[in-house]
Amino acid sequence: MPLLELRDLSVLYGGIEAVRGVSLAVEPGEVVTLLGSNGAGKSTTLRAVSGLVKPASGEILFDGRSIAGLKAEEIVRRGIAHVPEGRRVFPGLSVRENIMLGASSRPGMSAREIAREADDMFDLFPDIRRFSGALGWTLSGGQQQMVAVARGLLAKPRLLLLDEPSLGLAPVIVQAVFAIIAEIRRRGTTVLLVEQNARMGLSVADRGYVLETGRLALSGTPSELWGNEAIRGAYLGGRTRAA
């Protein structure tokens, strides 16, 4: 049974159909990358899974149970964490405090337990360990991305949704972020990854899906997607953006 399955999912923004009849599956332990240009519906798909937008039609199944229409808080409690595009680190909180917020969906934990688990995150993210007491606004884009992912992991998700983790980062930082994604997978967390940088997105993926104007255009393994010259040119340019 897939951990996550979308069946004929459609999402409307006003009268505009942003996602149209998308069906996909993510198996336990996989990294699956969702590719496509701006406006293709990638982020909307993640937002539907995490309960931030409601589907117009179709099914969203998590571990075989429907979660379509549930509140975002309930979806987090069921084991899905969403790291949105833009990182959204709280500027007035320290790195450690930002990470600790990830445990807010786990009732019954003591402050000491949360603090201990937040400290454990620095083993996975050693580049931000020395900034544990620094305020969010002082961090670079790459450091903020690592904090955002660590915060998502502190929810102990079975499925981690990552939206454009390479956005605005210099190439060397992109490499570090994707090394962390590979390690997250190695530790057993399933990942659904949205990326425009196709080369990096597929480098850590078991499978990929390509969206075009809200519809599923193609799916396959990374080698299958890269092996299709026409598709590679049209969808998988894999630009690395730096800022």
Image: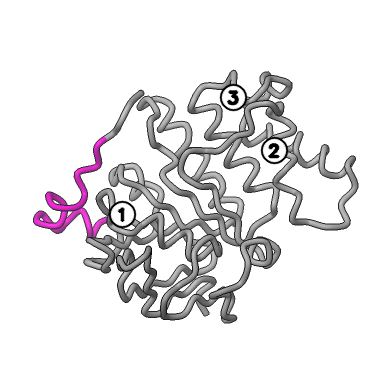
Above-or-below relation of 179 to 132 = below
Check residue 81 for magenta coloring. no
Magenta region, mostly helix, strand or loop?
A: helix
Tell me which residue sits at (34%, 42%) in the image: 200
Depth check, mark 1 against mark 3: the one in front is 1
Q: Amino acid at mark 1?
A: Leu
**Where residue 99 is drawn, which disc sits there?**
2
Above-or-below relation of 217 to 37 = below
In contact (CB < 8 Å): disc 2 and disc 3: no
Q: Nearer the viewer, residue 120 or 193?
A: 193
| Residue 48 position in % (x across, y down) | 48, 65
Q: Secondary structure at mark 1?
A: strand
Mark 1 surroundings within 10 Å by alpha-carbon count, few (fewer than 14), some (14 through 19), many (20 or more):
many
Q: Amino acid at mark 2?
A: Ile
Tell me which residue sits at (55%, 55%) in the image: 160
- Magenta region: which residues? 222-239
| Residue 231 position in % (x across, y down) | 14, 57
Depth check, mark 2 against mark 3: the one in front is 2
Q: Nearer the viewer, residue 29 or 201?
A: 201
Q: Nearer the viewer, residue 227 or 48?
A: 48
User: What colour scheme was applied to this rendering of the protein?
Assistant: one colour
Q: Which residue is mark 3?
A: 127
Q: Which residue is mark 1?
A: 35
194 left or right of 143 in image: left
Q: Amino acid at mark 3?
A: Asp
Tell me which residue sits at (28%, 53%) in the image: 39
Q: How many marks?
A: 3
| Residue 112 position in % (x across, y down) | 89, 40
